[in-house]
Amino acid sequence: MSAQDDSRENKQKKIFGFGDHSRGQKYDFIINGIKGELKTKKTGKPCSTKRRFTLETVSEWLTTDFIVSEYDENDSKELTGVHYYLPAGSLQSWLEQQKTKLFKGTDSRLGYSNVDYIEKMIPNESSEEDIQQLQKILKLCKKSVCLNCPTIPHSYIKKNGILLKEENFEKQKNYLKENKKIG
């Protein structure tokens, strides 16, 4: 996974006519009530998502539009002119897979079922003080359940996204605008 590159995201904003936003804001763009995320990836490679991927992320991303732009492997600051538009809902099956991982856990991450199992193992004869302490620990465990930057496969993006190429981009951009997909 490469570190976030603001210069690529700024190029995306310029290409698509999105205004400024600061890193850390919930969405990269909101236009006409449409919430969107901008992502970049190497040509033909998977797309990194976010470091702390939670159930809240799954819920929010079901209704979020995505624009994934490819960048040149030899010059990571340059976009190739190939962009994929993934309308809200198009990540649903991928998000369901991530939700399953969040519940089951992974080899290196706790899942909600792991925490539930631990909770069931609390002895009934525990003191009230012990139960309160264990409940506090379990609450912290549940808060720590997340995935670390799961990637969306290139094949998934290609299959479920709308390919936008800059050579006929204006026509495609107008189509998306007319259909209220982008601003």
Image: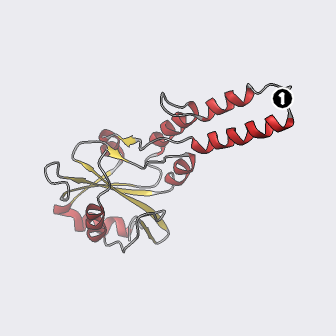
Residue with the most extreme bottom position: 19
Q: Position of residue 172 (x, y in %)?
A: 27, 63
For the residue marked with disc 1, what is the amino acid? Ser
**In the image, farthest residue toward the left:** 74
Horizontal and vertical percent for residue 25?
Answer: 46, 65
At 32% from the left and 65% from the top, the residue drawn is: 175
**Quadrant in which the N terminus is drawn:** top left
Q: What is the quadrant of residue 68 in the picture? A: bottom left
Percent coordinates x, y for residue 133 in the rendering: 75, 39
Mark 1 — residue? 126
Screen quadrant of the C terminus: bottom left
Mark 1, Cα crowd under 10 Å, few <14 / some 14-19 / many 20+, is few
In terms of depth relative to the viewer, which is nearer, 108 or 137? Answer: 137
Q: Quadrant of residue 150?
A: top left
Give residue 77's quadrant in the image: bottom left
In percent of width and height, residue 62 lies at 51, 51
Viewed as shown, does residue 24 lie left or right of 162? Answer: right
Number of numbered labels in the structure image: 1
Q: In percent of the image, x 48 and y 36: which residue is there?
A: 97
Q: Is residue 106 above or below residue 42?
A: above
- Indicate left or right for 114 with 11 as reference: right
